[in-house]
Image (spheres, grey):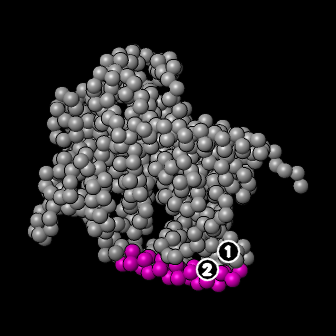
Amino acid sequence: MPEPEMQILHGLGVSAGVAIGRAMVIETRGPAIPRIHLPEEELDAEVERLRQGAQLAREELQRTRARAGEDLGNELAAIFDAHVLLLSDPGFLGRVEGRIRSQQVNAEWAVHKTAEELDNLFAHMDDAYLRERSEDLTDVSRHLLRSLQGMPHHEMPELQENVVIVADDLTPSDLIRLGRQRVIGLAIESGGRTSHTTIIARSLNLPLVSGLAGVTGLITEQAPIVVDGETGQVILHPTVEVLDRYLERRAEIRQRDRSLMETRDLGAVTRDGVEILLMANIDLPEEVHEVGCYGAAGIGLYRSEFLYLEKSPHLPTEDEHEAIYRQMIEAAAPHPAIIRTYDLGGRKLAREVMDTREENPVLGLRGIRLTLARRDVFRTQIRALYRAAVHGDLWVMLPLVSRLEEVRAFRQFAADCMAELEAEGVPFRRDIRLGIMIEVPAAAVIADLLAREVDFFSIGTNDLIQYSLAVDRNNEHVADLYQPLHPAILRMLRFVIGAAKDAGIEISLCGEMASDPRFALLLVGLGLRRLSVSPRAIPQVKTWIRERSSGELTELALRCLQHATAADVERHLESVFAMNDAREPVASDTESL
């Protein structure tokens, strides 16, 4: 059989570095469930695991039915009776068991495919009542999958060679789970430069190329693949010559990274003596050691929702929260650790917290809105934050604020939590700095009003750009419209920075925009003196800052503000930095995984 021909695909290089390995293909549209082949001797145990999962799901539904009966009455609660019966129906579970045995697959995959098959049958029935039963089937299969995923299950098989995940889509929680196994790179059909999956890939030091339409259909399991997260190229079935070239290039990248690390103990100070504080964006607890490793001036953003995603479907306990926050505070000392309260919603949707399904979750009940709507859930986190603050300099930041009323409501919520701690005799710190993310256009426009009510701002450009330009940052089809240099964004940034300075409060920027050294210099020129970036980006951003004066950067910003399009601003930056050899983004050392 002839060897497959080499193919070169072009996508978006969104997490830098080079990965060379074998492909593992995962199709995840809908539930993110890998298909795992099981040896025949494990099938009986897998069927038993399915049955136990079904029993757990039935018990959960019966508890839900009881609560619904109390709150809504028996007529509406009776909906759940049908769900409980379906979880005992041999027509459903029998099909799933049969698929486990006949296809030798894991229970999760068998549930997913069986539900998909039956849903298709229901959808083509003439009877409207039967067509509507597909919704019941969808809900039941989700309950069963959630039960199974909370039970001991088969992990990805251990492979002898490095694995590159090739997928149509991956959620942040999928990637957290996969990225800690034998995974060294990713090639994904969906996503953009600031999607949450991309952010996690950077945190895990995994090269990632996104926007690769149809890639899952172009390669088979175990086929050789190269992912170049800097150029956005993915090479399927590379030749020996191409492999040798990439091995050499990977070695050059690592040498470049080692050279940049020489700046670790130097300050990010411009040539004329203006100090810029480069802080670290942290997503996962294991990144904490990188704060000192890369010379960060504290933690500018800890995305605490990823603590939830790691524990899902369970909620972290108060003590678990407090332990992680204390770890952040100690790693950041003597600088502050800025911890953002849960920003669940959109791709980080938490069904256990939401208790509802939303048509457009990105514009729905998320961020501070969800915090205030579900105080029973968020009380655990708020109490833990005030407890952890006794160990050092902790600042609390609220996501997705769009109204003054939200800040005031949170202050009252926090006061209630502190009153509880005081009554219980639990040590806590009262004088925590409270700040907000400026990531909604409404907040940017009233930044001067918000600045009177909070202690600091942090500009979240990832969402601010998305909401201002009406561009979904996870959608590969409009990725080219996601423009950090759009004149509207630059003007908005200038106004917010000015409002903070006029009010005498601290302001930083923690979006992915600052990890690009060209953009970082523009932001300094706009007046920012604190930037929070991916830890691995710090050495290069610092190197660029040290090579220029603040006056030069102020002039750069003024000229960029005069341009009418993002393309014009881009061209201007290119012309200014054309002679700088440090243009390439910081890369990853994949073998460190």
Question: At numbered mark 2, what does the secondary structure look like: helix, strand or loop?
Answer: helix
Could you say where residue 332 lies in the image, as x and y percent from the top left?
Answer: 29, 50
Identity, as a three-letter code, of the amino acid under mark 1: Leu
Total marks in image: 2
Please state if 486 lies on the left or on the right of 393 as rendered: right
What residue do we see at 27% from left, 59% from top? 326
Q: Which residues are magenta?
A: 40-66
Residue 106: quadrant of the picture? bottom right
The residue under label 1 is: 38
Q: Residue at x 72, y 58 (%)?
A: 222
Which residue is nearer to you in this view: 69 or 3? 3
Measured along the vertical axis of the image, is residue 140 above or below residue 189? below
Residue to which mark 2 is pinned: 46
Residue 56 is a magenta residue: yes
Q: Is 42 positioned to the left or the right of 197 in the image? A: right
Q: Position of residue 588 (x, y in %)?
A: 53, 45
